Image (spheres, grey):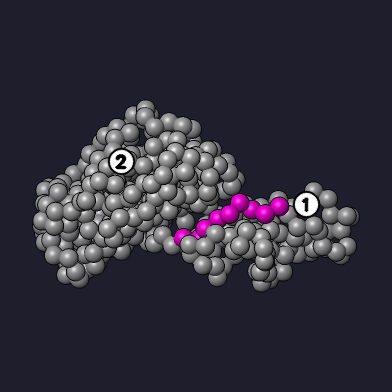
Amino acid sequence: VVAVRGNASLAVTWTAPASTGGSAITDYLVKYSSNSGSTWTNFVHPVSTVPSLTVTGLTNGTAYVIKVIAKNAVGISLPSANSAPVTPTSMSMVTVGNPGNAADTTGYGAVSYSYQIGKYDVTGSQYTAFLNAVGSTDTYALYNANMGTDANGAQIRRSGIALNYTYAVMNGTGSRPISYVSWFDSARFSNWMSNGQPSGAQTSTTTENGTYNVNGATTGNAVAANATNPNTNLAPTHRIPLENEWYKAAYYSPNYNGSIFAGYNIYATQDNGIPGTTIGSSANQANYNNAIRHATDVGSFSGSGSFYGTFDQSGNVYQWNDLDGTAGSSRGLRGGSWESFDTDLVVYSRVVDLPSVEYFYVGFRLARSV
């Protein structure tokens, strides 16, 4: 039984029994437990012989295990082994539709399919949960010591010693975007999400494979995303966005400036004028030019979203993108940061860098297929 986390839900798949006692399966019983199997709750669902379903009505932040029992005319089977513990988590995503849009004059932005992208950057709190799940030893350096000392970003304190590290958000900065993360760190976070947010050592079933087969690498070439997650035999649920996906979500509008025509804005605030820097619900505002002097909570500029409802794609922190998705020695950065000039926020500004670098002004957001 394999469970993959969703928002207050788990997508569950399992293998049908090899032997049925000579009678076809007529239904599956699916049970979940939030206390490691001490007590179980039946998930009520329509009769089905399909070996998959989505368990809904769960609590975000609580770990669950799943077991499945087959039914037929002979009776019921022994229960399956429990799934690995999986924790549903809310990571807000928005759908980017209007497939088949034309590219901008820069040559970027054309996407032939609908997809989802993070409404916000991955936050310090979300990255802390990741570290606590897989970083007790931190084999592949997911934690950068600057995360605990740089007061301008999301701060995370590491305590204890190797084999027993624990992590906690400092100074109420958990809603700020995480920074000091490389492309490799972002890929491992994507793997962890696609693998159902498991806990344990940094291995092929937690951080080293899933969306990306990074296989212990922290430097060198970035790898292409897997078409199938080898841990679930399903398409990966989370990944780093391609550059065209990031660009379209930030700047494209099918009714550009309120017209019936499509087009691209200069800033990811649905505006072509230089943004202001006032936190709140006013339109066309962003965190840049060192006006606020530190990263701000994601979504703080609540009136300045893109057409599709993303926030902070102009300013706050640069974000990794996967360029065209092929393996290579570089990866992309877009969006500018809290200390950037306005010319770093604009539609035609792009940076290409080594996937191993970690900067105080670089974070990431995730995407997924629909």
Which residue reaches farthest front?
A: 160
Q: Residue 116, position in %: x, y?
A: 40, 56
Residue at the image position 67 percent from the left and 66 percent from the top: 39
Residue 17: which numbered mark, if any?
1
Which residue was labeled with disc 2? 145
Helix, strand or loop at mark 1: loop
Residue at x 80%, y 57% (from the top left corner) = 78
Find residue 31 and report its horizontal and vertical position in percent: 67, 64
The structure residue drawn at horizontal position 77% and vertical position 60%, both measured from the top left corner, is 70
Residue 205 appears in the rendering: yes
Percent of width and height locating residue 76: 82, 62
Left/right placement of residue 3 relative to residue 287 reads right
Dot in front, 2 or 1: 2
Disc 2 residue type (three-letter): Ala
- Which of 151 and 113 lies nearest the eye of the viewer? 151
As shown in the figure, which amino acid type bears the numbered disc 1? Answer: Pro
Image coords of residue 145 (percent x, y): 30, 41
- Determine whether 128 is above or below 309 in the image: above
Q: How far apart are marks 2 and 1 (CA)?
A: 48 Å
Mark 2 or 1, nearer chain start = 1
Q: Where 351 sits versus 156, above or below? A: above
Taking 209 as reference, is 348 left or right? Answer: left
Task: Identify the secondary structure beneath mark 2.
Answer: helix
Overall secondary structure of the magenta section: loop
Give the residues in magenta.
Answer: 81-89
What residue lies at 62% left-to-right and 59% top-to-bottom? 36
The magenta stretch spans residue 123: no
- Disc sitting over residue 270 in the figure: none
* Number of on-image labels: 2
